[in-house]
């Protein structure tokens, strides 16, 4: 998931920050683009296009929790103070399950940051998603065509891309590797050999993992399977699998599941610091990497956004306490497989102040602001100056996500129908880890749940 699935504590918050006296706030004009609003001055002048709605509130709902939600709110602090639009943010560990409930119950947020195109499609089908204003649509040259399709349903554009994250990473400790004489693997065979070597040494387990995530428990396991499917068979089979032309029970997919089992269900390799294989199901994904810093675990497969989970003060870099390398392809004939995820801003209201926030979130200015305050966050907006990425993980991610030679695909479970990618697959893969359920039953359960 995406993804975008990043949670610690649910912290609803209201943003109300003051800027310098040089900025003046506009009075509400009730207008759309701010053309009839009082002029903003000083540092606030750049927000003139969004002015005219002072004293209004816009509710926003997402799965992003502290500490990452703190930087999210900082990213629009100046906008909020200058325009007078108060953004009331709520993050939830149960976002994927609760958003449909709230929408169906007439309690939809003004804006939702949706990490799954499949869930976006479900919300559009409900008839409650409002098409974006023209200013947002006009930003289309800031996104690559493929990203715009992920924010569209049946060819109609509904939600502007926001973040982009690199899923195909393995976190490790460069200091621990150097001390033990381990080298970063370049191929899947190298990765397997290194895992065996670490296991035989006995000082630590090679892998740690956790798939716990509230009502979204199971999503990290979908990433492991997606990485293996893409890295084994390439983009064409991956696309057919995501659309269910290739079923989970197909030999290609069950073979990929066997590869995942040999990797993340190998009792000699997992689950350092937590317990046996079954403990992966009860360990939260946020806690999963902590044994690396305790020299109990060698590696963790997680996305670029996991950077936010390392304790404050952790030295992250090629020679630091923590860094990451690209997960190699299972099949060396697959060129640079890269799985990515992202988030999309969808509106459930067309009030002028909501459209003003939606327009701002689709802009390069907001994306640049978010990059500046959010190490570990990469934008889908091509208007962002890459020199703003000062964090080494961000640079690594941005390079991989823009690599023209890469075989890039969006997170598969996020593209599948929400009933599968944010439901049946999570449940079945959790049972696969927690109960030792067979590959055949796991695959059959997902196939049986696929919408007709």
Image (cartoon, helix red, strand yellow):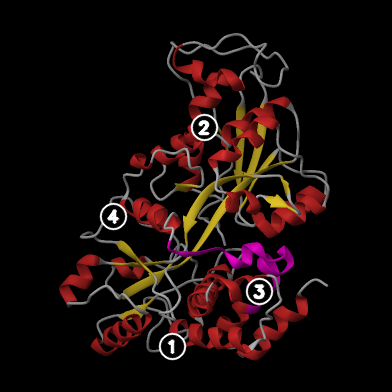
- Residue 257: % across, % down: 55, 84
Residue interval drawn in magenta: 405-428
Cα–Cα gap, marks 3 and 2: 39 Å
For marks 3 and 4, the one nearer the N-term is: 3
The residue at which mark 4 appears reads as 314
Is residue 84 in sight in this rendering? no
- Please report the residue visible at 65 percent of the width from the left and 14 percent of the height from the top: 35
Mark 3 and 4 residues: CB-CB less than 8 Å, in contact?
no
Q: Residues within 10 Å of mark 1 (few under 14, many from 20)?
A: some
Query: Does residue 238 appear left or right of residue 288 in this picture?
Result: right
* Res 240 label: 3
Q: Earlier in the sequence, mark 2 or mark 1?
A: 2
Name the quadrant of the C terminus. bottom right
Do residues under tags 1 and 3 come within 8 Å of each other at their CB atoms?
Answer: no
Q: Nearer the viewer, mark 4 or mark 2?
A: 2
Mark 2 Cα shell of 10 Å, populated few (<14), some (14-19), many (≥20): many
Q: Nearer the viewer, mark 3 or mark 4?
A: 3
Placement of the N terminus among the 4 image quadrants: bottom right
SS class of the residue under badge 4? loop
């Amino acid at each position: 998931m995406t993804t975008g699935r990043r949670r610690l504590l649910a912290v609803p918050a209201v943003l109300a920050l003051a800027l310098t006296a040089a900025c003046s706030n506009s009075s509400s004009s009730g207008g759309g683009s701010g053309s009839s609003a009082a002029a903003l001055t000083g540092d606030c002048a750049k927000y003139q296009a969004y002015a005219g709605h002072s004293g209004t509130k816009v509710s926003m709902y997402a799965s992003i929790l502290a500490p990452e939600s703190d930087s999210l709110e900082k990213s629009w602090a100046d906008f909020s103070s200058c325009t007078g639009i108060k953004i009331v943010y709520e993050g939830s560990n149960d976002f994927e399950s609760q958003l449909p409930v709230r929408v169906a119950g007439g309690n939809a947020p003004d804006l939702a940051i949706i990490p799954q195109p499949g869930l976006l499609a479900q919300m559009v089908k409900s008839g409650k998603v409002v098409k974006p204003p023209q200013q947002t649509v006009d930003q289309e040259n800031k996104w690559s065509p493929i990203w715009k399709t992920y924010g569209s349903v049946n060819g109609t554009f509904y939600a502007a891309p926001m973040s982009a994250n690199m899923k195909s990473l393995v976190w490790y400790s460069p200091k621990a590797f150097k001390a033990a004489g381990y080298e970063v693997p370049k191929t899947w065979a190298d990765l397997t050999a290194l895992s065996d070597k670490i296991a035989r040494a006995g000082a630590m387990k090679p892998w740690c993992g956790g798939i716990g995530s509230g009502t979204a428990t199971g999503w990290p396991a979908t990433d492991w399977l997606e990485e293996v499917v893409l890295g084994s068979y390439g983009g064409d089979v991956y696309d057919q699998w995501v659309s269910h032309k290739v079923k989970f029970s197909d030999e290609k997919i069950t073979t990929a599941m066997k590869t995942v089992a040999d990797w993340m269900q190998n009792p000699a390799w997992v689950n350092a610091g937590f317990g046996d294989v079954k403990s992966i199901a009860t360990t939260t994904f946020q806690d999963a990497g902590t044994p690396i810093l305790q020299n109990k675990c060698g590696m963790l497969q997680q996305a670029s956004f996991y950077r936010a989970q390392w304790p404050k003060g952790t030295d992250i870099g090629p020679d630091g306490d923590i860094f990451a390398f690209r997960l190699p392809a299972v099949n060396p004939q697959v060129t640079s497989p890269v799985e990515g995820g992202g988030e999309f801003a969808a509106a459930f209201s067309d009030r002028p102040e909501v459209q003003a926030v939606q327009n701002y979130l689709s802009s390069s200015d907001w994306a640049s602001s978010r990059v500046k305050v959010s190490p570990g966050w990469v934008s889908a907006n091509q208007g962002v100056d890459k020199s703003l990425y000062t964090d080494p993980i961000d640079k690594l991610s941005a390079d991989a996500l823009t690599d023209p030679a890469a075989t890039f695909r969006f997170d598969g479970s996020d593209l599948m129908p929400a009933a599968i990618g944010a439901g049946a697959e999570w449940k079945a893969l959790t049972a696969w880890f927690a109960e030792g359920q067979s590959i055949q039953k796991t695959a059959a359960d997902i196939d049986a749940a696929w919408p007709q």
